Amino acid sequence: MRHFDLEMNDLKKRLVDMAEIVQQMIKFSVDMIVKRDLAMSKEVFNREREANLTEIVVDDTCLKLIALNQPVGTDLRFITSAMRINSDLERMGDEAVNICEIGEELLKYPDLKPLIDIPKMATAVNDMVRDSIQAFNLNDPDLADKVLSKDDEVDELKRIIIKDLLAFMTNTSDQTTLIRAIDLMFIAKSLERLGDHATNIAEDVIFMVHGKDIRHLKSI
């Protein structure tokens, strides 16, 4: 294989590995809240450093590949998509950290209610992240389409969570109830953003394979 091809394969592997790290961060951050285990936060913060370092390496690799090889067509689409996916993965890691930090405050209080929909939402989001990066790894636009269709499920779960928590807030004047409800809303919002980033990756896969930019089509 040409040296260029080897570097492209290495770039793909780095992104797949980074996605695995991010999935672990999401799982640990949500498990920390559900299982009320503060020790899991250390796992999230340790992986954040690794994800941030990988982001820098991937960006640098992409720029060098463009500068030294002047790729066109499919190769150029792959590299530009890789740069965007890299950014989305890093932001996913940031959202997992946000969940973790909110969770640390939330666990200072007893459970507001049994957590049912937030774990469901987290599972749906992790499925989207897994499938979006697998679609990238396999050049599979059909799998990317499945990710796009799952985004509505995540949005609906967030709507249910917010509605449920608002009911708690309107029926109490207890300060700790309000604090816990607001924290859970922020966690639901972070999970929604994670789904949005997975959707971005799926859209990038479709662009990479077909050369078709489908971003923002719903709003046009």
Image: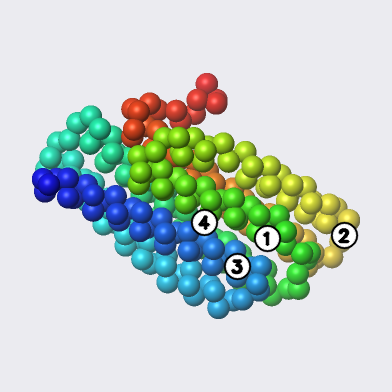
Q: Secondary structure at mark 2?
A: loop
Whichever of callouts 3 and 4 sits on the residue coming sooner in the sequence is 3
Q: Are marks 2 and 3 in contact (CB under 8 Å)?
A: no
Q: Categorize mark 4 by other alpha carbons within 10 Å: few (<14), some (14-19), many (20+).
A: many
Foreground residue among 65 and 144: 144
Residue type at the position of mark 4? Glu
Q: Give residue 176's quadrant in the image.
A: bottom right
Q: Which residue is mark 1?
A: 183
Q: Which residue is mark 2?
A: 172
Q: Residue at x 39, y 38 (%)?
A: 140
Residue type at the position of mark 3? Asp
Q: Give the number of the disc on residue 31.
A: 3
Q: Secondary structure at mark 4?
A: helix
Q: Secondary structure at mark 1?
A: helix
Q: Are marks 3 and 4 in contact (CB under 8 Å)?
A: no
Residue type at the position of mark 1? Asp
Residue type at the position of mark 2? Thr
Q: CA distance from mark 1 to mark 4?
A: 14 Å
Q: Residue at x 54, y 67 (%)?
A: 28
Q: CA distance from mark 2 to mark 3?
A: 28 Å
Q: Which residue is mark 4?
A: 95
Residue that protrudes farthest toward the right in the picture = 171
What is the x, y in percent for residue 215? Answer: 46, 30
Whichever of callouts 2 and 4 sits on the residue coming sooner in the sequence is 4
Q: Residue at x 64, y 68 (%)?
A: 33
Q: Categorize mark 1 by other alpha carbons within 10 Å: few (<14), some (14-19), many (20+).
A: some
Please, is residue 89 above or below residue 135 in the view?
Answer: below
